[in-house]
Amino acid sequence: MEDKLQQGLIAKGELHPEDKKYFEKYPAPIFELLVRNHYIQINHTTPFYGILLYSIIRAIQALSVAEIGVGYGWCSYFMAMAVKENMTRYQANGRYLAIDISGRPKNLFDLMEKDGLPVKFIQCNSLEIKSKDYIFENRKLDLIFQDGNHETKHCFKELDEIYPALKDNGNGYLICHDTNAWCEEYFKALRKDPRYKFEYISFPQNYGLTFFRNMANYDYDKIRFPLTKEMRENPIW
């Protein structure tokens, strides 16, 4: 247990001593159940983002997901688990790709891979990753979490490679962290940049989290669920 604690890793079903203190101070039974299945200590600064990302990935039925800048891997577990569960649900191959300049999270990804999660970890500067590297089995990205170097020029250089690999037509999502803090300059520049066709919603709490939806080639006039006369006469709602 001590060796695992030093690495920030915890056996499934157990709670890190700091997490025990957390739940004693802030009781949250459902959240605690989720954490007990994790490998590492809670990210106390943004504890709910991992669960939010999990829910989004499940909701959009994503099978090709990536993350730039994984830190200790708090969100990584939830994202990879969501992809795995989508693979089971939709009987298809999937991948969670993690990119980080540090080798610190490698032990975490080794454990996740051993447990059957569809992870691929690349240790490098994110600017070394090209559009083709994001493509999985000829499938573009459903979702990418951009949370590495927050310098505006760096973020846009990443986006030069991300954008061509991101699904369009409203089916691809770019999620940016710290858009109400260190990444605010990038966020403001990105939302006004005419090269990109994004809709977005931003959550300002916990340093800010913004969801960009790639609307390039999207037909706003198309009716995607036409209601028939019978449906209107016999509503199910």
Image: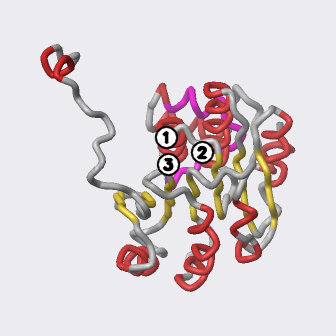
Percent coordinates x, y for residue 64 in the rendering: 65, 48
Compared across the picture, whether 124 is left or right of 147 comes to right
- Which residue does the numbered mark 3 point to in the structure image? 49
In what quadrant of the picture does the N terminus appear? top right
Counting from the top left corner in percent of width and height, residue 197 is at 41, 68
Amino acid marked by disc 1:
Ile
The residue wearing badge 1 is 60
SS of the residue under disc 3: helix
What segment carries the magenta color?
31-46
Screen quadrant of the C terminus:
top left
The image quadrant of residue 87 is top right
The circle on residue 42 is 2
- Taking the spot 63% from the left edge, 42% from the top edge, the residue there is 63
**Can you tell which of label 2 and label 1 is closer to the viewer?**
1
At label 3, the amino acid type is Tyr
Q: Residue at left 56%, top 85%?
A: 153
**Which residue is located at x 64 percent, y 38 percent?**
83
Front: mark 2 or 3: 3
Q: Is residue 39 magenta?
A: yes
Circle 2: residue type: Ile
- Which image quadrant is residue 234 in? top left
Which residue is at a point 68% across and 34% down the rendered structure image? 84
Residue 4 picture location, percent across and down: 82, 43
Q: Earlier in the sequence, mark 1 or mark 3?
A: 3
In magenta segment, residue 180: no
